Image (cartoon, rainbow, N blue to C red):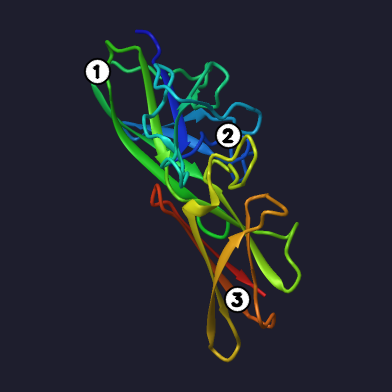
Amino acid sequence: MNPLNITVYLQALGGKLLGPNAYNPNYNSITVLINLDGTLIDLNYDAGSSTDDGNFTPLVSGSTPYLLPILTPNGSNGGQVDYLAADSNTVSATPYTTAPIVIESITPATIIATIPYPDSKPLTITQNILLIPTQSSYTFTLIVPGLLLEQNTATPPPNGISVLVKMMCGCQVSVNTYKSYWSPEDFDVTAYIAYSDGSIVTYAMTIDTSSNDSSFIATIDDLSYTQIYYTAQQRSTGNYGSLNVSA
């Protein structure tokens, strides 16, 4: 009985695959397992060494892991539509050659992906599958929803606050670059500033075009806050993210 050839892609909702730009992509930080009749089988997902997290194309092809488009809003014509394509060098999870997956009968199984996430527990995505002895090759794509929010310590504005808002693949929100697929106007970013007297002040945040590094900023009246709660919503996908930062 031949080993099963299984490929699993982890694609950010509305973005690229989780590769070298994802949060903490170091070896084994992103894990993909298959639960096969109660036995957990590790797949090899080495996001840290891969440089290919998918390629944009205006056309759907056989190498498109998932047909959900990547939308770039544009006020004049509605927006640009692209799709993600994969090649032989694209990051994915595959069985280790030293421990191939072999089944003898039709077997229900579950793919379990665990993705590290800042300021919270890891995100776990599961998908039920069915493995059949007469089928030797499988390709699955697990969609990873959400937005990746991180505190911006590199380019904070004077008398202000800053948070990095990225896709779950780590792709940046920017303007006027060849990688500006995710437009700032597609994101609603808000900061809720809490003070020791119990008061909370809300600030709408805007993209920092000077740094153009996916940071959203706001100038605030009182820097003596105790905590900041950041939220971000992407309109085109419904992606959501949050971050809690203490002073």
Q: What residue type is labelled 3?
A: Gln
Q: Pick whichever, 202 or 225, lies toward us.
A: 202
Q: Pick whichever, 78 or 177, lies toward us.
A: 78
Q: Find disc 1 in the rendering and name its residue.
A: 105
Q: Which amino acid does label 1 sit on?
A: Ser
Q: Pick whichever, 92 or 232, lies toward us.
A: 232
Residue 78 vs 54, above or below: the answer is below
Q: Which amino acid does label 2 sit on?
A: Gly
| Whole-percent x, y for residue 61 in the image | 40, 18
Q: Find disc 2 in the rendering and name its residue.
A: 19
* Residue farthest toward the left in the current orientation of the protein: 106
Q: Residue at x 59, y 73 (%)?
A: 228
Left or right: residue 84 versus residue 170 is: left
Distance from Cα at disc 1 to Cα at disc 3: 55 Å
Discs 1, 2 touching: Cβ within 8 Å: no
Distance from Cα at disc 1 to Cα at disc 2: 34 Å
Distance from Cα at disc 2 to Cα at disc 3: 31 Å
Left or right: residue 115 versus residue 222 is: left
| Whole-percent x, y for residue 1 in the image | 34, 8
When asked about the image quadrant of residue 141, the answer is: top left
